[in-house]
Image (cartoon, helix red, strand yellow):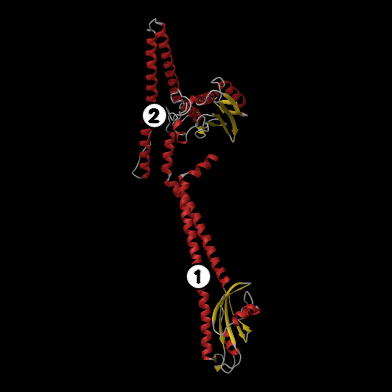
Amino acid sequence: MRRAARHVATSARLHILGWQVLLVGVALAGSVLVSREVLLARADERVDRGLARQVAELRRLATASVDPRTSRPFTDVRELLEAHLERTIPGSNETMLALVDGRPFRRSAEEPVYRLDNDPRVVAAFVAGPQPRYGTITTPAGEVRFATVPVQVAGAPERGVFAAAVFADRERAEVQEVVRVLAIAGFAALALAGAGGWLVAGRVLAPVRELRRTAQAISDTDFSRRIPVAGRDEIAELARTFNSMLDRLEDAFATQRAFVDDAGHELRTPITIISGHLELLSDDPAERTETVALVTDELDRMSRMVDDLLTLAKARQPDFLRVADVDLVAFTDDLMARVGALAPRRWRLAEAGSGTAVMDRHRITQALVQLAQNAVQHTGVGDEVRLGCRSRAGVVRFWVADSGPGVAPEDRDRIFERFARGRPGRGTSEGAGLGLAIVRAIAVAHGGDVQVLGGPGEGATFELAVPRRGPSGTGRPGAVVGVVAGGRD
């Protein structure tokens, strides 16, 4: 279940659909926001037009100064304001007031959401100034936009004011509701489009899944199989490219096998020749002693190189590891006993592991002894070399720390390549540059890795980390791709 979830989360199908939904969602959100701003602007314009219309109608009535109900001239301002209120129907969220001599006189018949005529602050704003004006005032019912028109009737002493007011927040709330419905409908459509896109993407990517299944069926030791190519589209081109890659991989592995075979042959042949010459040595004791020492030393060096190359070659084979439960306490005690005989150093166990781990005891011992030997070559007599083991978060970490010259940052990757060495520094190195290659091969075969820490002059700490539960995969715990390493050995 967890693997299936990870596969879905990393599939191209989900990535394609995710980006599509993201882009459409952003576009949809942008369009909703733009629509909201446009609708709000239009709502404000509609309010302003309504107020202007009310002002224009009152001015026409005041200019004519004739009561349309009786066809007689108005005798006072109250009649004019009453006549206008009776013949004018306010819009939604709109109310109208008639004020005479600074006091509310009458309002429109509809009950407003808030009685403006009962708010002294609002009344004062309406009667302020002798000229018509537009304004905005905040009330408990929200923002109110208003227009006021002073009115007088010839021969009448009273001064009247007509006020038309719109509850702007209520108008905007209607717009917000429309935008909310639009957003819900849009994102519901996006969800349906996403579901449809998932199905369509599955059909489009079906050839890619077939390509993946065919690639998985190709064994990592048999590169003879090829993916069938049909058509001339992008999928067919991908298959052709993949087949070309398999051709290159097959050539690379053939070259590697030839390298291992040739190296074994080229190294063993001189050994045989030297052994034959030893049998023909003269009886001169001095010459015999010198020749035997030189030849024996060369034989040992070549033999070690052959063994190292064979170990690296075997690291790719299924039977490279033989894992079992290993008690870490006993393992570290045994390791200290082994490395203590390498050279006169101050060997110290910095931290002992606890519990058990699934690993190849002999291969891990081989790797750590190689790291210890590496530390010996870069330290002097009496220098301290620390070893340690820690198990945490499902990973077992072994380390060997020395007080030598350390490893330059630019060398930390290079030293883990075959036949590579660190830059000149304190200490000697008589190896062929394969020791750290073997260490990494063992680490990677266990499903882990090895790294070097510490800068120049700070000593070097080589840390080998492996999963506590042992190597995982397809039943080939020793499978390694691209064995690297070997530098300060």
The residue positioned 51% from the left and 83% from the top of the image is 56
User: Judging from the image, what secondary structure is the residue with disc 1 in?
Assistant: helix
Q: Quadrant of the N terminus?
A: top right
The residue positioned 51% from the left and 80% from the top of the image is 52
Query: Position of 63 compared to 109: left or right?
Result: left
Depicted 469 relative to depicted 102: above or below: above
Depicted 115 relative to depicted 317: above or below: below
User: Judging from the image, what secondary structure is the residue with disc 2 in?
Assistant: helix
Residue 201, x across and y down, in percent: 44, 48
Residue 232, x across and y down, in percent: 33, 44
Task: State the mark number for residue 401.
Answer: none
Depicted 438 relative to depicted 10: above or below: above
Of the numbered discs 1 and 2, the one sitting upstream in the chain is 1
The residue positioned 49% from the left and 71% from the top of the image is 42
Q: Alpha carbon of mark 1 to alpha carbon of mark 2: how far?
A: 71 Å
Q: Quadrant of residue 267?
A: top left
Name the outermost residue toward the left: 232
Residue 103, x across and y down, in percent: 64, 84
The residue identified by callout 1 is 41
Q: Decide: marks 1, 2 in contact (CB < 8 A)? A: no
Depicted 349 relative to depicted 79: above or below: above
**What is the three-letter code of the residue carrying label 1?**
Ala
Count of numbered labels shown in the rendering = 2
For the residue carrying disc 1, how many other residues have a C-alpha within 10 Å: few (<14), some (14-19), or many (20+)? few
**Residue 216 visible from this viewpoint:** yes
The residue identified by callout 2 is 253
For the residue carrying disc 2, how many other residues have a C-alpha within 10 Å: few (<14), some (14-19), or many (20+)? some
The residue positioned 61% from the left and 84% from the top of the image is 99
**What is the three-letter code of the residue carrying label 2?**
Phe
Residue 361, x across and y down, in percent: 55, 24
